Amino acid sequence: MPRKNRRAEDEPQQPLTMPQSAAPLWALVPGVDVRRVSSEKPYRCPGCDLEVRPGSWHLVVIPQDAPDERRHWHEHCWRVELNSTRGRSR
Ligand SMILES: [Zn+2]
């Protein structure tokens, strides 16, 4: 007896889950990709205006609509920035 083809609509919906390991919880901001990276080049952190040392783990913040404007932040500075901007949306 042939099996009836099930339509995609009949499939139970899978909940969308973010991989929590990809980014710290406090880095999950709408419209921005945040990745934890280690780079061989020095960058200037916009939070404290100091250098992000080559080879050190830090965060790169990538606006989804302007990937060229990505910024490299010290983890500490990004956390401070997040705390200071949260709740200041208007
Ligand atoms: Zn910094």
Image: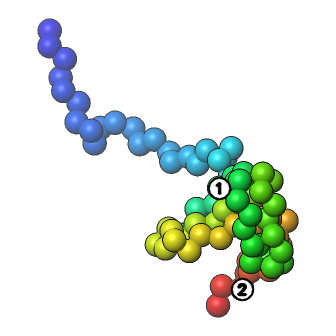
**Where is 81 relative to 75, above or below?**
below
Q: Position of residue 42 (x, y in %)?
A: 74, 64
Residue 88, disc: 2
**Where is 12 relative to 51, above or below?**
above
User: Which image quadrant for residue 33?
Assistant: bottom right
Question: For the point 64% across and 66% down, which residue is it?
Answer: 61
Image-based side of 68 in relation to 50, left or right? left
- Which secondary structure, mark 1? strand
Which residue is under mark 1?
35
Residue 14, disc: none
Q: Position of residue 78 (x, y in %)?
A: 77, 69
Question: For the point 66% across and 85% down, which residue is it?
Answer: 89
Q: Amino acid at mark 1?
A: Arg
Question: For the point 65% across and 70% down, which residue is it?
Answer: 71
Count the marks: 2
Please name which of the two marks, 1 or 2, marks the residue nearer to the observer: 1
Image-based side of 64 in relation to 7, left or right? right
User: Which image quadrant for residue 49?
Assistant: bottom right
Question: For the point 22% across and 36% down, which residue is it?
Answer: 7
Image-based side of 34 in relation to 81, left or right? left
Residue farthest toward the front in the current orientation of the protein: 41
Is the C terminus in the top left, top right, bottom left or bottom right quadrant? bottom right
- Which secondary structure, mark 2? loop
Nearer-the-camera pick, 49 or 40: 40
**Where is 62 relative to 46, above or below?**
above
Can residue 79 be seen here? The reply is no
Can residue 34 be seen here? The reply is yes
Mark 2 neighbour density, 10 Å: few (under 14) some (14–19) many (20 or more): few
Q: Position of residue 75 (x, y in %)?
A: 80, 62
